[in-house]
Image (cartoon, grey):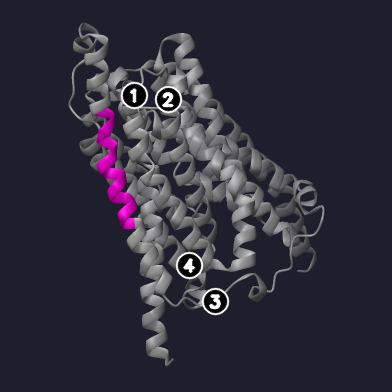
Amino acid sequence: MNESSQRQTYRFAFVMITSLFFMWGFVHNLDPILIPHLRRSFSLTVLQSALVDSAVFIAYFLMALPAGLLIRKAGYKAAMLSGLALFAAGALLFIPAADTQRYVYFLGALFIIACGLTVLETAANPYITLLGRPEQATQRLNLAQSFNGLAATLAPIAGARLILVDGASDAQLQAMSDSARQAVLAAEAASVKGPYLAIALVIVAIATVFFFLKLPAIGAGQTGRAAPARGAIARALARASIRRAVVAQFFYVGAQVCVFSFFILYATKAAGVSQIVAADYLGWGCGCAFVVGRFAGTWLMKYIVPARLLLAYALASVALCAVAMFSSGLTSLAAVIGIAFFMSIMFPTIFSLGIDNAGPDTEMGSSLIIMSIVGGAVLPLVFGYISDATHNLQYGYAAPLLCFVVIAWFARAVLREAQPAAAATSTGSIAHV
């Protein structure tokens, strides 16, 4: 293959893999639409509706290591095809879940989708760095991730109009007989079938293209990496930076899921807007703020030490969580949109600071930090418990407030460790003058 043909092949492969970033971002950001929808259909408490997030993020915890082993044994392409197969299967299971009207079946379908997404994310993130010149790897990865942010903006807007159908009001439902009420709720629950069938068909089409697409065969035997040695996990956790990053990432993902997943419920209670309007605020407000915040934070890091910027953003988020707990109207919505802006840099910043100078423990440290996103399964339950116990959904923001305090602690710890190193470097420079 000549250089021109190879470049064209790589470009097409990049486009196809970037489509994966968009698709997993899209389906993730339908979860905030599903939560109020399923809560109404099954008369759930806030805590019970939070099981949507638990089903998704437990899958990440359980599948992270198997996904890595699959990549080592079968290669990146086989892993991506496996992830797409699970993704499509989970989306198709929404049809029998809606037909049977069983909440546990919806949770099972979400779990299978998330298993597929775990495999896809584990494979696509590193692989896309290989599609071209090494010096442009970071640029390619950031470009692909920007489509994930685009999905965060579009999914709530489109999903609300397809899933949150205009049905009977709560008062009208209460006035109906049990059979009539069940029939109305069953019809509303069925609104998920069309969107998730469409998602499944798109994923099958993408998988078909991937099956015939000739990708560079970079697998376990070609990466030059040996299998992890026994005790690698304990050795990685012996590093304070990795240990703290695992804790911080656990709480960060928990905070992000609380903010996004409960936004529609929050907006309808705190600001008194309809679910459709709330979904628009989620997409155009939180989604755009998250994307803009990521670009703004990347630019600010040219002038501000990342850990210091992370500390400032975490403290700003703590303050905004307090505002979200006790304000109302547009002020409450502006506070949550502000949180989306400030938390945009947190995941990649915590990740990079955690594995900085980790040497031979970098790979295992990375895996452990990725596994810690199981916080997205745990903290929403805390949010739901507080909301149900206090009969005030706004007080649930005490959960993400605590999470941002932990992130501030992490950033402060990084800065404290950096001070002696900077002083030693400064002393060494003076000694050599």
Amino acid found under the numbered disc labelled 2:
Ser
Q: Residue at x 64, y 65 (%)?
A: 72
Residue 291 disc label? none
Residue 128 disc label? 4
Q: Nearer the viewer, mark 1 or mark 3?
A: 3
The reply to whether residue 291 is in sight is no
Q: Secondary structure at mark 4?
A: helix
Q: Earlier in the sequence, mark 1 or mark 2?
A: 2
Q: Residue at x 37, y 29 (%)?
A: 35
The span shown in magenta is 188-202
- Crowding at dot 1, Cα within 10 Å, few <14 / some 14-19 / many 20+, comes out as many
Quick check: 276 left or right of 260?
left
Give the alpha-carbon distance from disc 4 to disc 2, as whole Å.
35 Å
Amino acid found under the numbered disc labelled 3:
Ala
What residue is disc 1 on?
Answer: 265
Q: Position of residue 191 (x, y in %)?
A: 25, 35
Give the alpha-carbon distance from disc 3 to disc 4, as whole Å.
13 Å
Q: Earlier in the sequence, mark 4 or mark 2?
A: 2
Q: Nearer the viewer, mark 4 or mark 2?
A: 2
* Pick the front one: 141 or 108: 108
Q: Main secondary structure of the magenta part?
A: helix
